[in-house]
Amino acid sequence: MKVTRPMLAAAAAVAALVLAGCGTAADTKAAVPATATGSLEHLAAEVKCTPDMQTDADEIRQAVCKVAAGKFILATFATDRGQREWINSAKDYGGHYLVGRKWVAVGENSTVATLRSTLGGDIEQGTDHGAHTGH
């Protein structure tokens, strides 16, 4: 069978639909709430945890939280730049990061995914060191 331009165009259209998924943008937005904002205490209250403060400085506030889904670190930042610098450094150690505006939650993948259903945000992955071998 000879491949023609119309056949290629049809195959490309099908591939685009498969890659995009069958859902619409509205379906995706409905699955993840708007990203939460506020103080560390406000964010902790949203997920029903009592924060155990570890760092309380002008630039960063950081606490350990525990919920049914697991234990995680919740940090808030004074600036977007400070947050991004912290995340970029922390990602070298691996982990899973739920990132909102001037806040981040760090924990196991399942914990971060559960938190996302309440806090919204974007999930970022730290460096995977599993492929490294000791020579």
Image: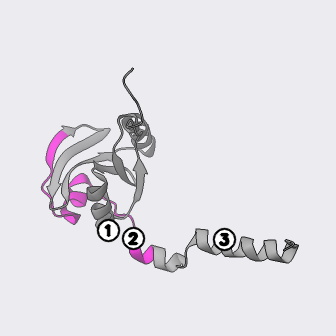
The circle drawn on residue 117 is 1
Type of amino acid at the residue the image marks with label 2:
Val
Q: Quadrant of the C terminus?
A: top left
Label 1 vs label 2: CA separation?
6 Å
> What secondary structure is marked by label 3?
helix
Q: Which residue is mark 2?
A: 32
Q: Quadrant of the N terminus?
A: bottom right
Q: Residue at x 42, y 36 (%)?
A: 131
Residue 25 is left or right of residue 81, and the answer is right
Dot 3 alpha-carbon crowd within 10 angstroms: few under 14, some 14 to 19, many 20 or more: few
Closest to the observer: 27 or 12? 12
Counting residues from the N terminus, which is met first, the one under dot 2 or under dot 3? Answer: 3
Residue 50 painted magenta: yes
The circle drawn on residue 16 is 3
Closest to the observer: 94 or 97? 94
Type of amino acid at the residue the image marks with label 3:
Ala
Pick out the residue farthest to the front.
1
Q: What percent of the width, then of the height, locates residue 110?
A: 28, 58
Dot 2 alpha-carbon crowd within 10 angstroms: few under 14, some 14 to 19, many 20 or more: some
Type of amino acid at the residue the image marks with label 1:
Ser
Residue 109 is left or right of residue 46, and the answer is right
> What secondary structure is marked by label 1?
helix
Looking at the image, is mark 1 or mark 3 nearer the viewer? 3
Q: Residue at x 25, y 37 (%)?
A: 57
Label 2 vs label 3: CA separation?
23 Å
Does the residue at mark 1 contact the one at mark 3 (Cβ under 8 Å)? no
Does the residue at mark 1 contact the one at mark 2 (Cβ under 8 Å)? yes
Range covered by the magenta-colored residues: 29-54
Q: What percent of the width, then of the height, locates residue 105?
A: 30, 51
Q: Residue at x 80, y 71 (%)?
A: 8
